[in-house]
Structure formats: C-alpha cells, structure tokens
Image (spheres, helix red, strand yellow):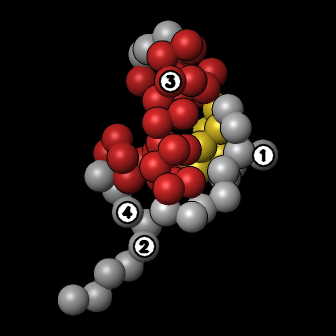
C-alpha cells in the first residue's frame, strides 16, 4: 500500500512531512482529533484523518463544493 493511500496519518509520518518532532506531531494530532470529536466525528487515538490533515495544513479539500 502506498503511503498516500492510507486513510489515517500517524505522528511519525506527520513529523517527517512537516519537519517537526514526534511529540509535537502527537500534540497536533490531539488538537485535530479534539476538533473532529467536538463536531461529532469518530476518532482514532494517535492518528488523524489524512484528508483533515491536508485541509488544515495545505488548505486542500478533496470535496467538491458547488456554489
């Protein structure tokens, strides 16, 4: 399986992508998971949705929004 095709991103992968420490990546994952959980989404501890990560850090949305 290709790295880009996984549903969740781990702290190790996030640390590598962003050039940050693993403990800081875990802190960011917790913040993102708290936000998701407050919006009634299910979460996985220690991982975060790759799609949500990309939206938060790159402003990329894979969802089509017709206006």
Q: Earlier in the sequence, mark 1 or mark 4?
A: 1
Q: Are marks 2 and 4 in contact (CB under 8 Å)?
A: yes
Q: Residue at x 29, y 52 (%)?
A: 59
Residue ID for mark 3: 27
The correct choice, above or below, for 67 with respect to 7 in the image is below
Residue holding disc 4: 61
Ranked by sequence position, the earlier of labels 3 and 2 is 3
C-alpha span from label 3 to label 2: 26 Å
* Residue pointed to by mark 1: 1
Frontmost of labels 3 and 4 is 3
- Which label sits in the foreground, 1 or 4? 4
**What is the x, y in percent for residue 32?**
48, 42
Q: Is residue 28 above or below residue 9?
A: above
At which x and y percent is residue 24?
48, 16
Residue beneath disc 2: 63
Tell me the element at label 4: loop
Q: CA distance from mark 3 to mark 1?
A: 27 Å
């Amino acid at each position: 399986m290709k790295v880009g095709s996984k549903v969740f991103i781990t702290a190790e992968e996030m640390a590598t992508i962003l050039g940050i420490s693993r403990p800081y990546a875990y802190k960011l994952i917790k913040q993102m998971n708290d936000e998701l959980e407050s919006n009634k989404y299910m979460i996985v501890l220690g991982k975060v949705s790759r799609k949500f990560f990309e939206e938060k850090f790159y402003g990329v949305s894979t969802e089509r929004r017709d206006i």
